[in-house]
Amino acid sequence: MAVIAFNEADVNLLARLIRAEAEGEGDLGMLMVGNVGVNRVRGKCLDFKDVTNIRQMVFQSPGGFEATQKGYFYQGARENERRLARRVLRGERFHPATNSLWFFEPSGNCPAQWYNQWNVGRYKSHCFYAPSQSDCPTVF
């Protein structure tokens, strides 16, 4: 069962995003990036109040993903990334991205806070940040 509405175009778009943002982090890293994207659509809170679908989430500006500004993002999705995208669209979650709305790759240690959100963990080079349950109950 899907946690947000999606079609095949959404699967392909999310697949391209997770590859472009986290291919070097392997399948688990790409799944976590997918969790963040799905959470932004589910959230309807904070910076994502008006984000209601995958396309809006991917291309949100300001506040969207840097990968959409790079040519690699615009290459076709591969079957592995489409399979990973479907997994997160159907509700699979992976710590530390379980409830996260943000991630980034710092040059050193993860800051305790980023944009006033608390660090909830790191996976390889990405640090993940989640809102409080009171600020964004629909991602919990």
Image: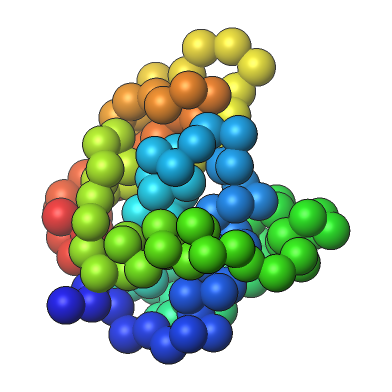
Front position in the image: 119 or 38:
38
Position of residue 111 relative to residue 78, above or below, is: above
Position of residue 106 relative to residue 92, above or below, is: above
Q: Residue at 58% across / 72% down in the picture? A: 13
Rendering quarter of residue 118: top left
Front position in the image: 38 or 111:
38
Q: Can residue 31 be seen?
A: yes
Q: Is residue 83 left or right of residue 26?
A: left
Q: Which colour scheme is used?
A: rainbow
Q: Residue at 26% across / 43% down in the picture? A: 94
In the rendering, at what x and y percent does residue 20 appear? 66, 51
How many discs appear?
0
Q: Residue furthest right?
A: 71
Q: Residue at 33% across / 26% down in the picture? A: 121
Rendering quarter of residue 122: top left
In the rendering, at what x and y percent does residue 103 appear? 48, 40
Position of residue 92 relative to residue 12, above or below, is: above
In the rendering, at what x and y percent does residue 63 appear? 60, 58
Q: In which quadrant is the C terminus drawn?
A: bottom left
Q: In which quadrant is the N terminus drawn?
A: bottom left
In the rendering, at what x and y percent does residue 43 appear? 30, 66
Q: Residue at 54% across / 24% down in the picture? A: 125
